[in-house]
Image (cartoon, rainbow, N blue to C red):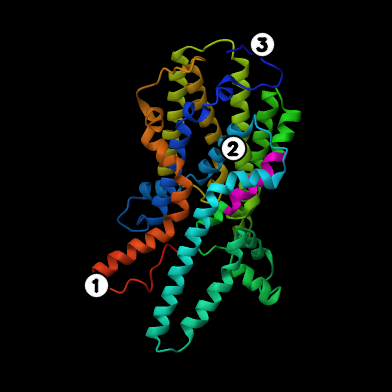
Amino acid sequence: MASAEEAPKGERTPLLASGSSKQKLAFIEGLRFVAVGWIVVYHYAAWTDSSVPEAVKRLITNFPLDLFTVVSGFVTHLAYANKDTSGGTLQFLGGRVQKLVLIYYLSSLLCLGIKLTNHAVEEKEDGGGGHGSKRLVNDLIAFVPDIFGINAWFSATSLLPVGAGGAVVSYLAETTMPTNAPLWYVQALAFCWVLYPTFKGLVKEHCAEQMGRVAVIAVCMWLLSMLPLCVYAVYPGGSQFQFLKVFPPFLVPSFLVGALACELHLQSQALSASSRPAVLSSQYAAIAAELLFVGYCVVVALVPLNGDLALHLWTLFWAGMLLLFSAAVAATEGYDGEAEQIQCGLKWVLDSEFLGLLGGVSLYVYALQRPLSILCHWCVDMTAGEPGWVHVQWMDW
């Protein structure tokens, strides 16, 4: 393969140009599964039980949702850094969500069907009093925003004074969470994809071969995400700012930090394209990344942290870990396509084909977790001879 000096101007790293970047950065899929698995454990583990040690509770409740967002930005830029995205935002968004649309609507309709079935049972038990029918109609009306994927935007209604806006604002506030509640994240992530083509154009125009500038922008993005959290955490009676947790623009800085981390990776690869780093440096990079991850687990388990500040507290931390893992891959990857794999440690586990498979479907698992959990709960209750449809709950959604 041509060296960096021989490559045409603007050509990216051999790692990306080789056409098999997904295989060579297999650890990313493993990280996606770790992040989603952690979130699902938080949703269903009995972490509020008094018998659970405090360290375990902190570890479970400090789930790295931000890690998934940073990884999503990294993966998006890795896939589209060399591709033409000038066809417009809608064309790019369509390409990103086409595989997700089916699972989005399938999981939403499953949850709606479960709710409507619950109301039908309640109506029967109520002796035809009409309460179940009213709830059924209300749920059908509340499902309308789910169709367009805009529920998460309604969270900003918490900024309005109580009673302001009448019935319309009340309706919007009540539909902040989709019928399949975890899909708020998919809706917010879609907004990040909407902005990506414009962001990519700005990076290409102003940050080409400017690694220092890319790093500074990443830090600024992180500060931008932390500022509203700090206001929310210290402002007296600042509960109205709680909407930030699910407001789509709130995810954008972390997503862009992930994309900038990928840009740093690509630029560093282009600079070192003419030489192959020592395998020893790969081991050091992999160990450093693993120590960062283990360090995160230790800190969140032992140190009480403000849960709201922690939402974006670790954004740059995750970006650094991705860069180190990527550097480990680059240092062991020969340009003839043969890699000298590290056969131990966290990276070796993340690189496994099994975790890679799970990581590839992680977003689908995330979308289906609620309807599947309710159906499993119902099956268990029916096996035990108990009525399973009514009062089947999932956290506080």
Which residue matches tag 2? Answer: 76
In the image, farthest residue toward the right = 205
Rendered view: 320 above or below 62: above
* Cα–Cα span, label 2 and label 1: 48 Å
- Left or right? Give the position of 386 relative to 68: left
Q: Kindly identify the residue that appears in the image at 62 percent across and 37 percent down.
A: 257
Q: Kindly identify the residue that appears in the image at 56 percent across and 36 percent down.
A: 75
In the rendered structure, which disc, 2 or 1, sits on the residue that comes first in sequence? 2
Which residue matches tag 3? Answer: 6
Q: List x then y, in percent, for residue 102.
A: 52, 54
Q: List x then y, in percent, for residue 143.
A: 56, 68
Q: Is residue 397 visible?
A: no
Q: Kindly identify the residue that appears in the image at 36 percent across and 63 percent down.
A: 375
Within 10 Å of disc 3 (Cα), the crowding (few <14, some 14-19, many 20+) is: few
Q: Amino acid at mark 2?
A: Thr
Q: Kindly identify the residue that appears in the image at 68 percent across and 44 percent down.
A: 195
Q: Amino acid at mark 3?
A: Glu
Q: List x then y, in percent, for residue 131.
A: 48, 84
Within 10 Å of disc 1 (Cα), the crowding (few <14, some 14-19, many 20+) is: few
Does 325 lie within the magenta span?
Answer: no
In the rendered structure, which disc, 1 or 3, sits on the residue that comes first in sequence? 3
Q: Which secondary structure lies at badge 1?
A: loop
The image quarter containing residue 122 is bottom left
* Cα–Cα span, label 2 and label 3: 27 Å
Does 193 lie within the magenta span?
Answer: yes
Q: Does the residue at mark 1 contact the one at mark 3 (Cβ under 8 Å)?
A: no
Residue numbers of the magenta segment: 187-198
Residue 101 versus residue 209: which sits nearer the camera? 101
Which residue matches tag 1? Answer: 385
